[in-house]
Amino acid sequence: MIEVKDLVRQFKSGDRTIKPVNGVSFELGKGTLASIVGKSGSGKSTLLSLLGALDKPTSGDVIVDGVSLAALPDTKLTEYRRRDIGFVFQQFNLIPNLSAVDNVMLPMEFAGVRKAARSARAKELLEQVQLDPEKHGRRINRLSGGEQQRVAIARALANEPKLILADEPTGNLDEQTGEHIIALLSSLSRDHNTTILVVTHDRSLANKADRRFRLQQGRLSEEASRQRVAAPAS
């Protein structure tokens, strides 16, 4: 379970104090797909950076399965990012001259997993995100945007993280492909019992999450939830 307590991140801008995250609190259970919507500059990316331990809060805490991030030294925060967090980005952030399989294997290599096990798991994950097996060995720069995002999601799952943070994961995709990616994330959160938090400006996609939040002027509010979207057809 992820528990966020009174999270604040403030910056100085001249004589002004800016708080893109201002007293945010919420809890997410395992296997939940949650979404956060908000305008550009509302603090969404700042909040994801705090949850992913890429930035430290001014005050407040993030607690993951009973472990307080505020109490962890930098070395342990690095382990947390490597072991417990998976990141999915709008720009995919894949290595273009490597194959799909090699991109998914990379986080496992950093975690010390043996090559044979890395390869087997990478292929299994690519099958789960429904990438055509004929394209597993294809270089990233020869895949479509939707296919690249599938590889990025498989890579995020590589080390069996407790939490996946997705920053505008459908921002570079057409509407139909974007909807399929959201459905895929929903299916994976259920199948892997992984908590997934998606930040998006697209309300129609956000509405398909189990729980929906809005971030406005650094404040988070929860909206009425809707029925979970069905898994994509194979």
Image: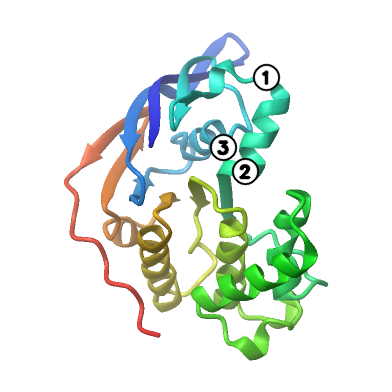
| Mark 1 Cα shell of 10 Å, populated few (<14), some (14-19), many (≥20) | few
Q: Are the two marked residues, 3 and 2, in contact with CB atoms closer than 8 angstroms?
A: no
Residue 203, x across and y down, in percent: 31, 56
Residue 232, above or below 206? below
Give the residue displayed 83% in from the left and 72% down from the top: 97
Earlier sequence position, callout 3 versus callout 2: 3
* Three-letter code for the amino acid on which mark 1 is drawn: Pro
- Compute the Cα span from label 2 to label 1: 15 Å
Of the residues under marks 1 and 3, which one precedes in the sequence?
3
Extreme residue in the top direction? 15
Badge 3 element: loop
Sequence-wise, the earlier of marks 2 and 1 is 1
Closest to the observer: 105 or 145?
105
Residue 90, visible in the rendered structure? no
Density class for disc 2 (Cα within 10 Å; few <14, some 14-19, many ≥20) is some
Write down the residue under mark 3. Answer: 52
Q: Image quadrant for the C terminus?
A: bottom left
Badge 3 local density, few (<14 within 10 Å), some, or many (20+)? many
Taking the view exactly as shown, the residue that stands out farthest to the right is: 97
170 shown above or below 194 = below
